[in-house]
Image (spheres, helix red, strand yellow):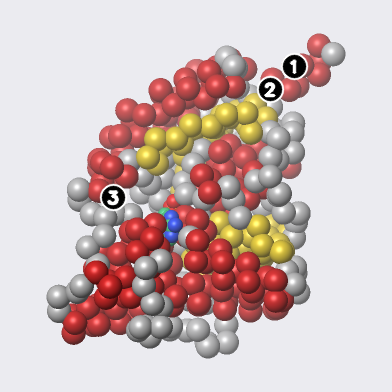
Amino acid sequence: MAIRLVILVLMLVLGIETSCDETGVALYDATRAPPAGLRAHALHSQIAMHQEYGGVVPELASRDHVRRVVPLVHEVLKQAEVALADVGALAVTTGPGLAGALLVGTSFAHALAFALGKPVIEVHHLEGHLLSPLLSARPPAFPFVALLVSGGHTQLMRVDDVGAYRLLGETVDDAAGEAFDKTAKLLGLPYPGGPHLSRLAEFGNPLAYSFARPLKHSGDLNFSFAGLKTSVLTEVKKLGNLCEQTRADIAAATVDAITDVLTFKAVAAMRASGLNRLVVAGGVGANRQLRERLDDAARKRRFEVYYPELALCTDNGAMIALAGALRWRKDPGCAHAPGSFDVRPRWPLIEA
Ligand code: KG4
Ligand code: ZN
């Protein structure tokens, strides 16, 4: 009994996420399968701080992570009723993301690991997103196709196991989240535009305009969203002053174009892979219109779709603690002694 207790305590992973504008901290028990291993998580979003600038200001983001990370660690330990000394390893996002923001989390994790005499596990931010649906009440089994749709990435991956990822296709220019955010900005909506554009679209007619769907019929699994922004900009300039209904119609037609292409390519990936589970992850995975469309396609084509809990779609520490814990369990050698470190603002997931 005493030995079992010691093993349990040593497998607690403290996850730290600071790659962009959210400071996330979580504690995951690596001895338990997801979702049961998640002991606690806490988040501070910087959205309100960046809103007045219309986008993320990297220097402000880094400084705010410095202020938030320690209180969030205390909050998580308190929630889980665990002492700092019981943490078995630190998992931290070391890329991709904003260099300064990544440095805050990574240097903090190394310093804390050094003080505790515990190892560090480096986590790829997208791997966190990819595995986040495992924390939902209905976790998917491997293998599955993953549609990763965030502010910085749009990718289709084949996922055979933790760490076994194959890129099927990706955006050649803007990410889906960027397409949401940039169009929202054109319509005068606050940052981050995705959820605002989605809400405005509810009042509009998606057929009022027909916006570009570049690469939809390219025959491969790549995406392109830069042309959509240009096509919306051209329409907005042509119209001049926009009344409320026109803004809603433009929002609806934009959301329609983005979700149409995402669904079309996701279905193509399901067909090409022969798999019957689709996992959707990343901030845009919270989008209601996208979920409706994917659910509809899944019903017609008889595959299952899995989403993270809404609160875990956007950046959070829970997915980083989980990814670190699953990696650690699979390969204990991935945890290394703290000390010298680096961050990787650009880091392809297949190299993780
Ligand atoms: O995954 P995430 O939190 O951060 C990155 O790793 O990029 O994704 C943020 C992106 C932003 O572009 C945001 O506008 C978008 O996700 N987003 C949404 C929704 N919620 C967040 N886009 C459309 N509809 C939403 N409900
Ligand atoms: Zn993210």
Q: CA gap, disc 1 to disc 3?
A: 43 Å
Q: Is residue 6 above or below residue 61?
A: above
Within 8 Å: ligand 2 and the Cβ of disc 1?
A: no
In front: 19, or 294? Answer: 294
Within 8 Å: ligand 2 and the Cβ of disc 2?
A: no
Q: Is residue 76 above or below residue 291?
A: above
Q: Earlier in the sequence, mark 1 or mark 3?
A: 1
Give the numbered dot on residue 56: 3
Residue at x 66%, y 62% (from the top left corner): 305
- Is residue 100 visible in this depiction of the protein? no
Say what secondary structure mark 1 lies in: helix
Left or right of 308 on screen, residue 61 = left
Q: Where in the figure is residue 293, as x and y percent of width and height?
A: 56, 71
Q: Is residue 177 above or below residue 113?
A: below
| Residue at which label 1 appears | 6
Q: Residues within 10 Å of mark 2 (few under 14, many from 20)?
A: some
| Residue at which label 2 appears | 10
Q: CA gap, disc 1 to disc 2?
A: 6 Å
Q: Amino acid at mark 3?
A: Val
Is the C-beta separation of discs 1 and 2 under 8 Å? yes
Say what secondary structure mark 2 lies in: helix
Q: Amino acid at mark 2?
A: Leu
Q: Earlier in the sequence, mark 2 or mark 3?
A: 2
Q: Amino acid at mark 1?
A: Val
Q: In the rendered view of the protein, which quadrant contains the N terminus?
A: top right
Q: CA gap, disc 2 to disc 3?
A: 37 Å
